[in-house]
């Protein structure tokens, strides 16, 4: 006597249709969302590289429900020797994909996630950031060609990311309220410049410009920015309607940082410098996160509301910090406004 069990029959059909890891991961990559947003182009490019280089050669043709704990452990033991960051990233990506497969509804593709090596997805930060001093920052700005000076000043004093700076347009600078409106960012992926939202929801923000920077910003708009609200502030050197490539900036930034005695200072470290400078004014953690746009989306809204009225005060104190440094060195108090 045969008993018809619809659920069992369905589960049996599902098992027969279980995809290989590569088929499933390709679909996962296509449909992946983070907090409701598609993956950033650079993230998508990085995931694709990790899959093609490290995951698919081992598991690409394997049916996803046949990947065992031993399989994952042996793969991890031999994975990217000497490249701890890549090793952690590849493992973390595989674990995340398998976690999704184990939580598929109505029927999970796998009964459990076979990737559960404690701490394998973590890596220690290799680069320890030492922020630039005010004297080092001044030297860097002085050594840069004129069209790059304001870019470095905004990177440091307004703690902006490279992709945010290179997508800034004339219409994003509000000289009436002394604020820069950060609404977009540009990234380069597969040789193409892609304009999208900032790195996180919290990255969409208005940042008060320290008063001592305003003359430099106004001068840059006058001397180096095209007419119209959509003109790029920091375009490619030879094409005013094209985005600046990182390599273009590095050609002038590397000699400038060497002149300051800081060959270790990455461009992104200027943003970290800005966070330290703002903290020195007495800004709270919430105010710093609001200024930096560096938090989770839910918390960002609360932090930005808390920081909105205080951001101008933070900017004013940043200028006071710069002026007091110049006065302490015996410089003209207005020097920092001419950088």
Image (spheres, helix red, strand yellow):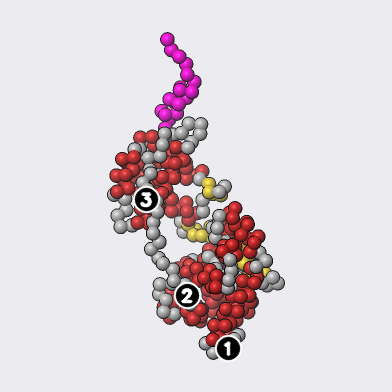
- Identify the element where label 3 is drawn: loop
Asked if residue 174 lies left or right of residue 149, the reply is: right
Q: Which residue is mark 2?
A: 132
Q: Which residue is mark 3?
A: 120
Residue 40 vertical placement versus 214 (above, below): above
Say whether marks 3 and 1 touch (CB < 8 Å): no
Q: Residue at (51%, 53%) from the top-left corner?
A: 40
Q: Residue at (57%, 78%) from the top-left corner?
A: 321
User: What label does residue 332 carry, if any?
Assistant: 1
Which residue ends up furthest to the top in the rendered image? 1
Quadrant of the image containing the C terminus: bottom right
How far from the left and from the top, in percent, is residue 28? Answer: 47, 42
Between the C-alphas of marks 1 and 2, the distance is 21 Å
Quadrant of the image containing the N terminus: top left
Q: Earlier in the sequence, mark 3 or mark 1?
A: 3
Q: Residue at (37%, 55%) from the top-left corner?
A: 86
Please rate how many residues cluster around mark 2, counting C-alpha atoms within 10 Å: few if below 14, some from 14 to 19, many from 20: many
Q: Along the line of sight, which residue is nearer the eye, 48 or 74?
A: 74
Q: Is residue 6 magenta?
A: yes
Asked if residue 189 lies left or right of residue 240, the reply is: left
Q: Is residue 142 magenta?
A: no
Between the C-alphas of marks 3 and 1, the distance is 54 Å
Instruction: Report the magenta residues as a range.
Output: 1-20
């Amino acid at each position: 006597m045969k008993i018809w069990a619809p659920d069992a029959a369905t589960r049996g059909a599902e098992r027969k249709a279980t995809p290989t890891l590569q088929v499933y991961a390709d679909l996962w990559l296509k449909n992946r969302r983070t907090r409701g947003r598609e993956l950033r182009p650079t993230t998508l490019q990085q995931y694709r590289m990790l899959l093609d280089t490290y995951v698919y050669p081992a598991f690409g043709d394997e049916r996803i429900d046949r990947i065992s704990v031993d399989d994952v452990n042996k793969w991890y033991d031999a994975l990217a020797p000497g490249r701890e960051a890549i090793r952690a990233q590849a493992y973390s990506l595989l674990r995340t994909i398998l976690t999704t497969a184990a939580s598929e509804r109505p029927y999970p593709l796998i009964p459990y996630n076979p990737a559960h090596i404690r701490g394998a997805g973590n890596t220690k930060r290799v680069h320890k950031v030492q922020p630039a001093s005010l004297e080092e920052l001044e030297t860097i700005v002085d050594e840069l060609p004129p069209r790059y000076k304001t870019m470095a000043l905004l990177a440091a004093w307004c703690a902006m990311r490279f992709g945010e700076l290179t997508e800034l347009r004339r219409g994003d600078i509000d000289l009436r309220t002394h604020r820069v409106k950060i609404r977009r960012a540009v990234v380069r992926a597969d040789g193409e410049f892609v304009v999208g939202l900032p790195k996180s929801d919290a990255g969409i923000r208005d940042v008060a410009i320290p008063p001592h920077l305003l003359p430099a910003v106004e001068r840059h708009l006058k001397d180096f920015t095209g007419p119209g609200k959509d003109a790029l502030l920091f375009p490619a050197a030879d094409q005013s309607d094209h985005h600046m490539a990182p390599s273009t900036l590095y050609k002038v930034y590397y000699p400038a940082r060497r002149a300051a005695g800081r060959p270790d200072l990455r461009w992104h470290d200027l943003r970290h410098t800005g966070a330290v400078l703002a903290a020195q004014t007495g800004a709270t953690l919430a105010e710093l996160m609001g200024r930096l746009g560096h938090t989770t989306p839910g918390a960002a809204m609360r932090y930005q509301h808390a920081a909105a009225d205080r951001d101008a005060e933070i900017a004013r104190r940043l200028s006071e910090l710069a002026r007091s440094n110049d006065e302490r060195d015996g410089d003209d108090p207005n020097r920092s406004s001419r950088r």
